[in-house]
Image (tube, grey):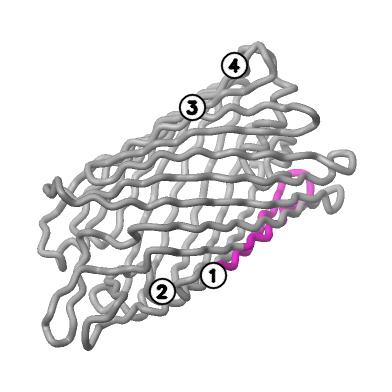
Amino acid sequence: MRLQLIAAFAVIASAAVAQAQVDDAESGAGTLDSELALYADDDATTVVTTLVNADVRLPVPVIVDAHALVDAVSSASVDVVSAATPRWTETRVELGVRAQARFAGLDGDLGYLTSGENDWRSHGVTFGVGRDLADDNTTLRAGYGYTANRIGRARDPVFERALSVHSAELSVAQVLGRSTLGSLAYTGQVSDGYHASPYRYVMTTSGAAAAETHPTDRARHALTARVLHALGPVTTLDASYRVYVDGWGVSSHTAQLALTRELGAALDVRLRARGYYQGAADFYRESYAAPMRYMSADRELSTFWDAGGGVKLAWYGDAVEIGVKIDGSYYRFLDFARLAGRVAVVTGGGITWRW
C-alpha cells in the first residue's frame, strides 16, 4: 500500500497533509495539478469545471499553494422555466492562495479565497492550526474562516445584498492500529444576511406571486466520523458518516464508502458509493395557501434523497500522475412538484506533475 495514501487520511483536513510535508520537502520542490470535469443532468443543466493548482516549497520552511478554478454553467432547469427566464449561461471564477508552515511544534496555514460571477462576489480568509501528539499517533486541528458575499441581480444595478459567513472546525485524527486510522470532526457555521435567491418567486394557491424570503440568520452544525482501514497490502477501505442539523429545521444524514485497490505497481482503481437523506426546512411548503413571513421555492430546502457512486482509475509515474473518473447520482425530491427526480453524471480527468 502506498504510504502517501495512508498518510493523507491520517488527518481530517487537506491543509494538515501539506503542512506535514513542509519539513520533508526540499526548497523549490512542488507540484502542478490540472483537472477538467463535466457535469450534466436531465434537468437541462451542464457545468464544465477547469481547475489548476500549484504548490512550491520556499527556501524557508513554508509551502505556498495557489489555485484557479473556472465553472462554465448553462441551465434551463425547472427553476429557470418557472421564473419565466430563458436558458442562461454564466462563468464563475475562483482564485485562492494559501501559506503553510511548521512553527513551535504546530502546523499552521493562512489562506485567502475570492470568487465572482455576474451577480455574486465573495472574499474569504481561512486560518488553521494543528498539532501532533502521542508520538504522532494523534492529530488535533482547529480552523476558522470568514467569507463576505455581495449578491446582485442581473440587469438590475440597484439590487445589492450582503451575506457574511463565519465557519469553524475542530477535529481529531487517531491511529487505531497498524492498519486503521480514524477521525472525528465537528464543523459549525453561522451566517447572517441575504440567504434567498433574487430570481425565485413563490406562487400561492390563490395565484399571488411573492419574492422568496428566507430568515436572515442561519446556524449549521455537522459531525463527521471517518475510518480508513487497510484490507491487506493492496486494498484500502474508506468509510464515513455525517450528521447535520441547522436552525432552519433542516437535518441530513450522509454515508460514504470507498474501496481502493492496487491493480499493479503503478495503477489503482477506486470504487465509491454515497447515500444522502434530508428533511425539509420548517418553513418550506410544496405550496402556500397564503403569503407567510418566510417562503421558499428552493428544492434544496425540501425533503429529498440521493444515491450514487463511481469509479476512478489512477496511474502513478515517477514524476507524473494521471487519473480519470466517472460518477453518477440519482436525486428524488419528495415534496417538490415541479421536479420529481434528477439523474446527474460527472466525468473528468486530471494530471499531476511533481518536481
Q: Is residue 67 magenta?
A: no
User: Percent position (x, y) of residue 113?
Assistant: 45, 36
How would you rate the neighbour count of disc 2 (Cα within 10 Å): few for under 14, some for 14-19, many for 20 or more? Answer: many
Residue under pointer 3: 66
State the residue at coordinates (37%, 64%).
216
Q: Left of 327 or right of it: where is 296?
A: left
Magenta span main SS: strand
Q: Mark 1 points at which residue?
A: 245
Task: Pinpoint residue 240: horizontal percent, then vertical percent.
Answer: 64, 60
| Residue kind at label 2, given as amino acid type | Phe
Frontmost of labels 3 and 2 is 3
Alpha carbon distance from label 4 to label 2: 45 Å
Q: Distance between the residues labelled 1 and 3?
A: 32 Å
For the N terminus, the image quarter is top right
Q: Residues within 10 Å of mark 3 (few under 14, many from 20)?
A: some
Amino acid on which disc 3 is placed: Ala
Q: Residue 86, position in %: x, y?
A: 10, 56
- Please name the amino acid that badge 1 sits on: Val
In the image, is residue 232 above or below residue 341? above
Q: What stretch is highlighted in magenta?
A: 223-244
Residue at the disc numbered 4: 355
Rounded to the nearest angstrom, the CA distance separating label 3 from label 2 is 36 Å
Tell me the amino acid under the disc marked 4. Trp
Q: What residue does disc 2 label?
A: 304
